[in-house]
Image: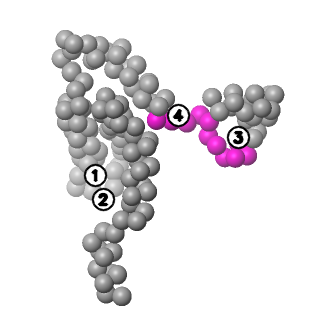
Amino acid sequence: MLTQIFQGFFCSAHRAGVILAFLKYNYLIMNLDELTTKMHALVESKGWYAEDSVKQQTPRNLAISLVLEAAEVLELFQWQADCKDREALAGELADTTLYLLQLASVSGIDLEQAVLAKITQNQTRLWPEHQRKERDV
């Protein structure tokens, strides 16, 4: 999409690609909205949004599924310092991300804005260990 926008300004896909490459922008990466759209298409294609689905896509069920998938990420590290199977880790992280995107979407939460707000909040937040250091100084 960004290539098409730049192409409109610079009259060729090649020039747009060169500029984007120069800016080190990877236009092949999807944003959260695109990933959410693909996730909804998958869920819809499986019939999981149907009223009679055995996999009702309620916020409660999605929150449970999110935690279960996160536990599968943790399981890959059980009894070892590192995960030995990066492909399995990637798959479990993807499953977790899909549930997170869906939970945010069906709950009406703009995940991108929520993450940006949390980053801003955490910039000025002091955790207990930081508060102790400041008292000791």
Residue at mark 1 to residue at mark 2: CA–CA distance: 7 Å
User: Which residues make up the magenta segment?
Assistant: 20-32
What secondary structure characterizes most of the magenta part? Answer: loop
Which residue shows up at 36% across the image and 41% down it?
93
**Magenta-span inclusion, residue 48:** no
Q: Amino acid at mark 3?
A: Leu
Q: Mark 2 highlights which residue?
A: 81
Could you say which disc has been placed on residue 77 in the image?
A: 1
Q: Mark 3 highlights which residue?
A: 20
Q: Amino acid at mark 4?
A: Met
**Magenta-span inclusion, residue 29:** yes
Q: Is residue 1 left or right of residue 97?
A: right
Q: Secondary structure at mark 3?
A: helix
Question: Can you give x and y, in whole percent of width and height, for residue 15 in the image?
Answer: 79, 34
Q: Please tell me which residue lies in front, 19 or 128.
A: 128
Tell me, yes or no, if residue 86 can be seen here: no
Q: Earlier in the sequence, mark 4 or mark 2?
A: 4
Residue at mark 4 to residue at mark 2: CA–CA distance: 31 Å
Residue at mark 4 to residue at mark 1: CA–CA distance: 28 Å
Residue at mark 3 to residue at mark 4: CA–CA distance: 15 Å
Q: Earlier in the sequence, mark 3 or mark 2?
A: 3
Tell me, yes or no, if residue 74 can be seen here: yes
Closer to the eye: label 4 or 2: 4
- Please tell me how crowded label 1 is: few (under 14), some (14-19), or many (20+) other residues with Cα within 10 Å: some
Q: Secondary structure at mark 2?
A: loop
Q: Amino acid at mark 1?
A: Phe
Q: Are marks 1 and 2 in contact (CB under 8 Å)?
A: yes
